[in-house]
Amino acid sequence: MTLSPAYEENREAMLERVADLAAQQDKALAGGGPKAVDRHHRRGKMTARERIELLIDPDSAFLELSTLAGWGTDFTVGGSVVTGVGVVEGVECMIIANDPTVRGGSSNPITLKKSFRAAQIAAENRLPTINLVESGGADLPTQKDIFIPGGQHFRGLTEASADRRPTIALVFGNSTAGGAYVPGMSDYVVMVDGGAKVFLGGPPLVKMATGEESDDESLGGAAMHARTSGLADYLAADEQDAIRIGRQIVRRLNWRKLGPSPLTDYADPVEDPEELLGVVPTDLKIPFDPRAVIRRIVDGSEFDEFKPLYGTSLVTGWARLHGYPIGILANAQGVLFSEEAQKAAQFIQLANQADTPLLFLHNTTGYMVGKEYEQGGIIKHGAQMINAVSNSQVPHLSIVMGASYGAGNYGMSGRAYDPRFMFSWVGAKSAVMGPAQLAGVVSIVSRQAAAAAGRPFDEEADARTRAGIEAQIERESLAYFTSGMLYDDGVIDPRDTRTVVGLCLSVIHNAPVQGARGYGVFRL
Ligand code: COA
């Protein structure tokens, strides 16, 4: 095909962004830094990522989640925990691994948010959970933010079990105080001899509480728990052995996926996904045709467009991806008008009738404003789309390709609408509106307030405030920042979209896939 003249320019700009993404992700990969990692290795221990690599099937993909958690905060990027879906003995499992190189693997507010998101994904998609435990428990300086809500972690484990989603704890190191309830609440517990330490209170605390003299091993060593307390079901000789036993446990779960199976003989896209680098401009103000993206992510580049002549700034249609059927909604010209909103509401209902998962490709500045559109009922039409999205029961996947502003973020199944997974392309932006528009609105409002109060308006001060606000919103809209706040599940290279969506679809099909059988009242 003929690629646009801007192709090379776009490609260069996107490659720069992708290189920067790798640099940001390196911060998470570094954990607590080389000194802490060295010390950990010298103790004969594996890092969280090394443990995961050994746990999952050789050469299988690990769908890492929330890699940039905490980006833009004072906490270490990654939140001192690694989470993601990995394949163990052919079974997709949620893996949650404490990173002991970051403040002893203790849990801060970011750790908590990230672990809760992982637990939510496991619950919604019916996944077994494997916890790789080595943690100093609550991050003591931030205990006020985590102690009370943190209780949900343990409640979630036992709820998972009640829901027949197996929970497995492989305990490599410290698991004290509240942390002791991770093995305590799990279905299966493996402890590493000489490594695991599982007690409600360590020797100093016991001494303070009761005066009793004790040591780590007799209070909470793996051998004691395997032979005496019975908290450990398996005693592992070392870390590798614990992982071997963990894999053996998964093998015996007799796990069956409950969603429909995909076609196995699907074709790769005819149009090269590599070209995603160049067909999409990095300047979010330049619109692009999302069909160029769709053709590069779906099987055989085959896309059956629905209602192509109506509401043309939203593209809707059917395709397959890695053999799974999907309905796609993709913004084209940015703005959503009444026609687009109604088209979306109809399409989402059709997907629910056919039990077909939906993929939302965001690039929207929101619903159209202005007298003509207000009088034409843009609010109620937007409400129809939001009603359809909210009450839809088929799994949703959201990819923010460009802008995701205003109520457009809601209508396109943004975070608050619980898509099963949501990823942003590097360079995407999510906010209530564009940074320049937002700063302009603040300026108009303060100008009007000054006029109403009869005060003179300081133009210079306004220009400074405006620039300051614009810079602040610019930074806070960045995909890194919103991902850091756990508003999505990760930032990705556009070229990885097909693989990431395909992995997500496979994960989703662990649970039954069934559309809504009824809807709320559609305001007409
Ligand atoms: N909260 C905040 N910081 C903690 C922490 C916690 N619960 N546990 C460890 N850290 C910090 C340490 O202060 C140290 O910080 P520094 O590198 O800036 O000095 C860093 O993590 C590494 O700790 P260190 O003790 O040197 O590592 P270790 O591998 O020898 O031991 C632990 C790790 C977890 C066994 C040990 O730190 C410990 O016992 N922590 C307290 C556990 C506890 O009682 N938690 C209360 C749970 S409610």
Image (cartoon, helix red, strand yellow):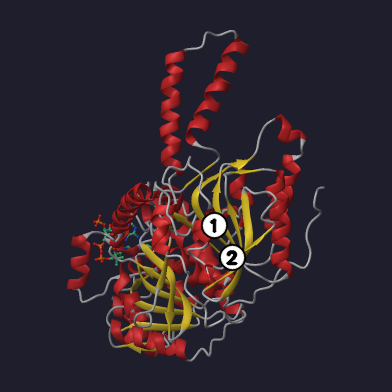
Residue, disc 2: 303
| 132, above or below 288, in the image | below
Q: Is residue 27 visible?
A: yes
Q: Residues within 10 Å of mark 1 (few under 14, many from 20)?
A: some
Q: Residues within 10 Å of mark 2 (few under 14, many from 20)?
A: some
Q: Which three-letter amino acid code belongs to the residue tagged 2? A: Phe
Circle 2: element type: loop
Which quadrant of the render holds ligand 1?
A: bottom left
Q: Report x, y in % for residue 304.
A: 63, 65
The reply to whether callout 2 and callout 1 are in contact (CB within 8 Å) is: yes
Q: Which three-letter amino acid code belongs to the residue tagged 1? A: Arg
Q: Which quarter of the figure has residue 361?
A: bottom right
| 254, above or below 119, in the image | below
Q: Is residue 492 visible?
A: no
Residue, disc 1: 291
Which residue occupies 28% across, 71% down?
Answer: 47
Measure the C-alpha gap from mark 2 to mark 1.
Answer: 8 Å
Q: Report x, y in % for residue 404.
A: 54, 47
The front one of 430 and 486 is: 430
Q: Report x, y in % for residue 16.
A: 31, 50
The front one of 218 and 61 is: 61
